[in-house]
Amino acid sequence: MPASPSAPPRRAAKRLRAWLGSGAVQAVLTLVALIWITPLAGLLLSSMRSDRDNASSGWWTALTDPGQLSLDNYTALLADSGITRAFWNTVLISVPATVLVVGLAALAGYAFAWLEFPGRDAVFLVVVGLLVVPVQIGLLPVAKLFGAVGLFGTVPGVVLFHVAYGLPFAIFLLRNFFAEIPREMLEAARMDGGGEWRIFSRLVLPLGRPALASLAIFQFLWVWNDMLVALLFADSGSQPLTVALQQEMRQFGSNISVLAPGAFLSLVVPLVVFFAFQRHFVQGVMAGSVK
């Protein structure tokens, strides 16, 4: 009996998992993880030390003298109305920009993959061509356009910019993923009386959950950590946390008691989002490796 076409990729994935499970590889990965986590530990300890302690000694001295650590810096940071407003502005920018990109890209990806309409391939080529357009090229023209329509310096303006520049890659990614769904499965659903919307919502979206989760993680992290777009398109009332911390650095220079807890607060949310969707992200990576 001939082997299944998916047998070689499955065997390759099995060998890869066996190789990653070896003792030597585990030791190397543990060492890499420790090296990667050292700056994070240093940032956390520095954020819990006073300016005097940070100026007089390194953060590692807190490991032998825990009395240096306190939550006073975080208490002062959360009492700063400018920082807390910037944090919520970051949430108000990142969440809609992620939801809109994933939702619109899923609809467009399904249309490009499985719907027949005039000019489909030409439009998709245009979308793919937009991937090579650097974000810096659109800053000035879009800024003038937003100024003319009253969106410059607002949260919706920053959201729209991120959505516009996030859609080409998102559509390209989801279209390719949806195109891998067996045609027979969709045809069977149509023969059972399912309309396009029902097929999309009940069949395609559940099958594409790993790709959607991976896209959501990348988009959220990109928008959350962005400073270039927000620095240009946001004013003092709509600036996110990255811009607020940059201004603190410009005003106070080495004010570690503000910058360190602010940077760690900005880091915690992406980590929570990544670990919350980690299972789906790994599924998406493995699905792409064995198809």
Image (cartoon, rainbow, N blue to C red):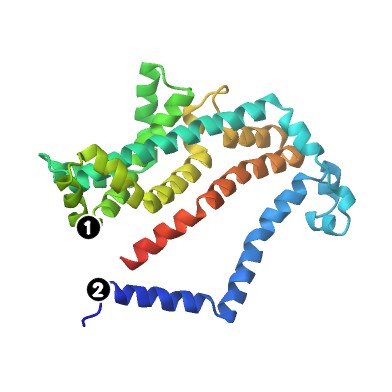
Residue lying farthest left? Answer: 118
Please tell me whether residue 92 is drawn above or below residue 107 in the rendered image: above
Count how many numbered circles sit on residues in the image. Answer: 2
Going 54% across and 46% down the picture, which residue do you hit?
273
In depth, the one of 57 and 114 nearer the eye is: 114
92 relative to 118 in the view: left or right: right
The residue that label 2 is drawn on is 5
* Label at residue 182: 1
Q: Quadrant of the C terminus?
A: bottom left
- Please tell me how crowded label 2 is: few (under 14), some (14-19), or many (20+) other residues with Cα within 10 Å: few
- Identify the secondary structure beneath mark 1: loop
Specify which label sits upstream in the sequence, 2 or 1: 2
In depth, the one of 26 and 153 nearer the eye is: 26
Going 86% across and 44% down the picture, which residue do you hit?
52
- Identify the secondary structure beneath mark 2: loop
Image quadrant assignment for residue 257: top right
Q: Position of residue 266 (x, y in %)?
A: 62, 41
Please tell me whether residue 105 is drawn above or below residue 140 in the rendered image: below
Image quadrant assignment for residue 12: bottom left
Q: Position of residue 247 (x, y in %)?
A: 63, 32
Going 60% across and 68% down the picture, which residue do you hit?
32
Amino acid at pointer 2: Pro
Amino acid at pointer 1: Pro
- Please tell me how crowded label 1 is: few (under 14), some (14-19), or many (20+) other residues with Cα within 10 Å: few
**Residue 173 showing in the rendered view:** yes
Going 52% across and 40% down the picture, which residue do you hit?
224
